[in-house]
Amino acid sequence: MTAPGSLPPDAEYGAIPFDLFALDHWDYSLPPEEDEQQWNNLVQKYLSLSERERFPWHQWGGQVHPQIPTLTPENVARVLRPHQTAQERIISAYAAPPCYNFVWLRTCYDPALQRQYDELLRASGAGGDLAMGPEWVLDNAARYDFGSERSEIVARLVRRIPSLCDPYRASVEEDYDVYRVEDQESGHESELVRASNRVRLGVCVVDEEAIRKQMVKIFWLGEHGQCLWHNEVAPDMVEAMSGVFKGGFSLEEGVEGFFTVGERG
C-alpha cells in the first residue's frame, strides 16, 4: 500500500482521472471482500470509453484535491490506496505527454535465469539515469509474475495501472478532435501505420523468452488497454530508443531504426 504523504503532487489521490472515475462509480454498499473485483470491473469499464468520453474526469485530473464529493479520506483508503503502489501512481501521473516514457516490466522470476536477466538489464540501461529511470522499472515477483502470455501480461498490467492507456487528458473537450485526425486519415495505410497512429504507450516486457534470447519485447498499447503491435529491440538499443521517443518518434519511425518490424496485436 502507499503511505500517505509519499507522493508528488501530480500523483496525489484525486489528481489522476481514473481516481475520480473509480470514486464516482464505486458501490460502497458491497462488502470489502468484493473490492478487488469492483476495481477490476471499473478498470474495464473506464478503458472501454473513448478518450473523449473520459473528459468529465480528465478535466479534473492533475488538480490536487479537486472539490469532488466522493474524494474523502475514507473512500481513498478503501478504493484507491489498496490497489496501487506509490510507484504505480507516479507512473500513472507521468505517463502522459510530454514525457512519453517507456515502462520496463519484468514478468519472469525464475532464479535459474537471474544472471541472464541481470545481463540484459545492464545492457539496456533501464533503471539508470539516461534511459528509463528506476521509477519506470516494474520488477517485483509478488506483483508482476505475469508469465509469458501476451494477452495475460497486458490485462494484468492495465488492471494495476489503467492510466498507462489514458495519456491524452484534454482540458477542453474539442481538443480530442486533434488526437483523432491521424486515425481518420490512415484508412488507406498499412497495418503498421494504423497501429502507430493509435499507440498511447510502449511497454518493455522481459519474460522468459526475452531473457533467453537476450532481447527486449515491446508491447504497444492503445487507449482501450489493448496491445496494438508487438516487436523486439536489442537491449543495447533501449537507451537510445527511449531518448528519441521522448523527442516525438513514432512506432512506424522506430521500425526503421530500432525494432524488428513485429506484428499486430
Image: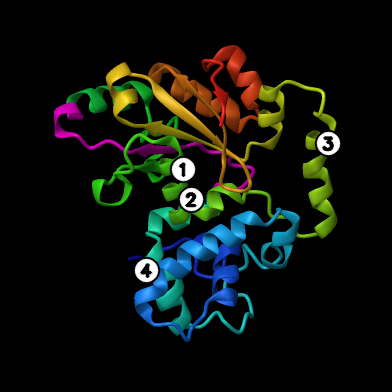
Give x and y (percent) for residue 91: 48, 50
Tell me the crowding category of disc 2: few under 14, some 14 to 19, or many 20 or more residues within 10 angstroms, Cα based.
many
Q: Which residue is mark 2?
A: 158
Which amino acid type is marked by label 2?
A: Val
- Please name whichever residue, 87 or 206, is drawn nearer the observer in this view of the structure: 206
Distance between the alpha carbons at the discs numbered 4 and 2? 16 Å
Distance between the alpha carbons at the discs numbered 1 and 3? 26 Å
> Which residues lie in the magenta part?
95-114
Q: Earlier in the sequence, mark 4 or mark 1?
A: 4
Q: Tell me, yes or no, whether the highlighted magenta stretch contains residue 105.
A: yes
Q: Is residue 195 left or right of residue 77?
A: right
Q: Which residue is mark 3?
A: 184
Q: Is residue 13 left or right of residue 100?
A: left
- Dots 2, 1 in contact, CB < 8 A: yes
Q: Earlier in the sequence, mark 2 or mark 3?
A: 2
Name the quadrant of the N terminus.
Answer: bottom left
Q: Earlier in the sequence, mark 4 or mark 3?
A: 4
Residue drawn at 37 percent across, 24 percent down: 124
Q: Please tell me the numbered disc located at residue 46.
A: none
- Dots 4, 1 in contact, CB < 8 A: no
Q: Which residue is mark 4?
A: 82
Distance between the alpha carbons at the discs numbered 2 and 3? 26 Å
Q: Please tell me the numbered disc located at residue 154.
A: 1
Q: Tell me, yes or no, whether the highlighted magenta stretch contains residue 75.
A: no
Query: Could you tell me if residue 219 is visible in this image?
Result: yes
